[in-house]
Image (cartoon, helix red, strand yellow):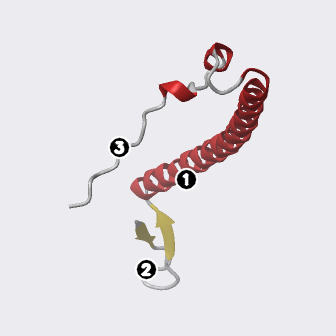
Amino acid sequence: MWQLVPKPNQVNQNKLFKMIEVATKCFLRGTSCLLRETSCNRILSRNARRFLRRNAKEKKLSEMCTKVLSGAVSEFGDDSDEYEQLGGTRKSDRKKPVRKPKA
């Protein structure tokens, strides 16, 4: 909000504009809101980087687990107790597919 303030000796000529107190408060509120938004964006960006790093580490871990299970299959077989202890599902424990009869 702006308020029209006349110069001391001139009533209608060369009037100055002066911001009133309410507008100053609104302006300050708006800038602090922008600063908060900027800091929130910084936090979101940092979290996105952490998320990507975590996903990369998770993928590496998954690949290592797959290699360990493959090694267990080659050493002990896919129906062994050792394979199951490492987190694999024994071949004999897998559910057999049920075929639907043709109608």
Image coordinates for residue 37, horizontal then vertical, percent: 55, 50
Q: Which is more N-terminal, label 1 or label 2?
A: 2
> The C terminus appears in which quarter of the rendering?
bottom left
Q: Residues within 10 Å of mark 2 (few under 14, many from 20)?
A: few
Regarding mark 3 in the picture, which secondary structure is present there?
Answer: loop
Q: Give the residue drawn at x 70%, y 25%.
A: 77
For mark 1, what is the residue? 34
> The N terminus appears in which quarter of the rendering?
bottom left
**Which of pointers 3 and 1 indicates the residue nearer the eye?**
3
| Nearest the eye: 81 or 32 | 81
| Nearest the eye: 44 or 72 | 72
Regarding mark 1 in the picture, which secondary structure is present there?
Answer: helix
Q: Which mark is residue 98?
A: 3
User: Amino acid under label 3?
Assistant: Val
Residue farthest along the front direction in this orientation: 102
Regarding mark 2 in the picture, which secondary structure is present there?
Answer: loop
For mark 2, what is the residue? 11
Q: Residues within 10 Å of mark 3 (few under 14, many from 20)?
A: few
Left-right relation of 36 to 96: right
User: Amino acid under label 1?
Assistant: Leu
